[in-house]
Amino acid sequence: MTDLTTLTLAQALDGMEKKQFSSAEITNAFLGAIEKANPHLNAYVVVTAEKARAQAAQSDKRRAAGQAGPLEGAPLGIKDLFCTEGVRTTACSNILGEFKPTYESTVSANLFRDGAVMLGKLNMDEFAMGSSNETSAFGNVVNPWRRGNEDTKLTPGGSSGGSAASVAADLCLGATATDTGGSIRQPAAFTGTVGIKPTYGRCSRWGIVAFASSLDQAGPIAKTVEDSAMLLQSMAGHDPRDSTSLPNALPDFRAACQRSIKGMTIGVPEEYRVDGMPQEIEDLWRQGIAWAKDAGATIKPISLKHTKYALPAYYIVAPAEASSNLARYDGMRYGARVTGKDLVGSYEQTRAKGFGAEVQRRILIGTYVLSAGYYDAYYLRAQKVRQRIAQDFRDAFAEVDAILTPATPSSAFGLGEKSGDPVAMYLNDIFTVTANLAGLPALALPAATDSQGLPLGLQVIGKALDEESVFAVSAALEKAAGFKAKAAKWWV
C-alpha cells in the first residue's frame, strides 16, 4: 500500500470510502510520522495521540453505519490559536501557561462535527505575531524544505508556520490556520502548500485567541486547491456567537475548483512590482499571467494606488487592536502568574515574564498610537488609509473578476537571517496585508521552484464573498503549473 501520509485529503477520503484503509490506520500512520519528524521540525507543540485514536475509532464506526460526514476520519492539525476543549491552548505564549479551555472553538467544532480527527496542536508565532515562526515560546518551527545542498535551517513562514510545515512534511492531511496580515498565505508560499484566507466573517472567530479583531480570519492550509476548498467548506458558516460572522449561505467551494475561467477578466496591479524583488518572482508572475491567458481569461492592467500605504497602515491598526485585546492577560483569572510586591507589581512581572519581545514591541506600539495625543495622527489616519485601500479594490473589481499577484517577495529565508531587523521582517507581508485591510478572500498556491529548489507561490485575490472565483482561478493555475515538488524527508 502507498504511504498513507502522502495522500491528499481528497484521496484519503476516497480511500476510506472504498474501504482500502480505515481512519485508525491512517491516523496511526500520521502519529508515527510525527514521532519521527517532530524532534527535527518542531511543528507540533502538543500531540493528542490518545484523543486521535479514540476519534478515529468512532469515525470508523460511523462510516460502517453509513453515517460518514464530509471529512469523516481525516486526521488534521489544529493551530495553537484555536481553543480545544481539554487540550492545552497557549497561542504559543508563556503567559497562558498550561491553560486548558473548557470549550471548543467554532471552527474546530465544525471540523469535528464533519468527522475530522485531531492529531495535535501546531506551533506558531506567539499570539500570531510574526512572519517567521521565531517568536514562539516553544522554539521555532523548521521548514522541511532546504536550499540546494545546504543544511541551513529555513523558516516555514509565520505566524502559521507549524500548520504549513506539518502539511508540507506529510504530518497531517490539512491544518487550521489564521491570517491577520498574511499568516496563512506567506507560510503556504514558503512551504509549497496551498493556503486561503476567506472573506472576513466567513469563518467564526469565536474561540480563536484574538490578535487584531478587525483583521483576523481563520482558513485552511492544505496540499491542493481542492483540499483547501473541502476544508473551508467545513470550517466556514454563520455563528451567532461572533458578531462579525456573516449569515450568507455557503456556496459549493469544491465544485468551484472545476469551473472554467474562460471569459473571466483577471487584473494585474502595477503597484505589486517592488524594488529589489527577485527576478524569479517577476518571471513566475509573468508565467502565471500566461497560464491564465491560455486558460481563456483576459488580462487587464489595474491600479491599486494606495498599496504603498498598506504596510504602515497595517502596522498601526494591528498593534492598536492587539494592545487592547492582550490587556486581558494579567495573570489573575487564567494562565501564568508571577507574584509581585503588590497587585500592580504582579501585573508588571506577569506581563514582563509572560510576553515575548515581539509581542511586547507590538503592545507598546499599539498603546502609543492609541494614546490621547496621537490617536488622530496615527490610528484614525490609518483607518482612513484602510478605507482608501478598500475603495481601490472596489474600483478594480468593477472591471475584473480576480486579481493575480506574487504571494511573497522572496522564497523562504534562513532562521535568524531577518530576526534582528523587525522592518525587514515586516516587509514579508507586503503582498498579503492589503487583502486583510479590505477583508477580501485571497489564496496562495505553489507554482514553481527557484534556483535553490525552494517553492515560490502566486496569490489570487477575489471580491468579498467570491471565494468561488478565487478557487476557480487558483485551480486553473495549479493545473497549468503542475507543481509536484516535495521537500526531501531528511529527518527520516
Image: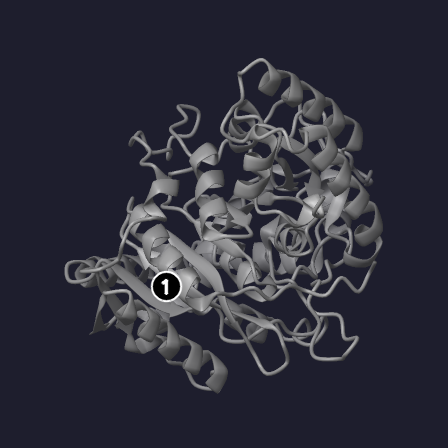
Residue sitting farthest toward the top: 65
Residue 136 visible to the viewer:
yes
Amino acid carrying label 1: it is: Ala
| Placement of the C terminus among the 4 image quadrants | bottom right
Query: How is the model colour-coded?
Result: one colour
Residue 287 vertical position relative to residue 322 in the rendered view, above or below: below
Quarter containing the N terminus? top right
232 relative to 61 in the view: left or right: left
Residue 357: percent from the left, percent from the top? 69, 60
Q: Is residue 56 left or right of residue 386?
A: right
- Left/right placement of residue 263 relative to residue 102 reads left
Q: Nearer the viewer, residue 304 or 196?
A: 196
Query: Which quarter of the figure has residue 365?
Result: bottom right
Front one among 62 and 411 = 62
Q: Residue furthest left?
A: 398
| Occupied quadrant, residue 410 | bottom right
Viewer-nearest residue: 272 or 299: 299
Q: Is residue 47 visible?
A: no
User: What is the x, y in percent for residue 322?
Assistant: 53, 49
Other residues around mark 1 within 10 Å, as few (<14) / some (14–19) / many (≥20): few
At x 28%, y 48%, the residue is 464
- At 59% from the left and 39% from the top, the residue drawn is 12
The residue that mark 1 highlights is 377
Of the pair 386 and 226, the residue shown nearer to us: 226
Q: Residue at x 60, y 71 (%)?
A: 422
The x and y percentages for residue 197 are 44, 50
Q: Secondary structure at mark 1?
A: helix
Give the image location of residue 349, x and y in percent.
77, 46
Residue at 55% of width from left, 59% of height from top? Answer: 188
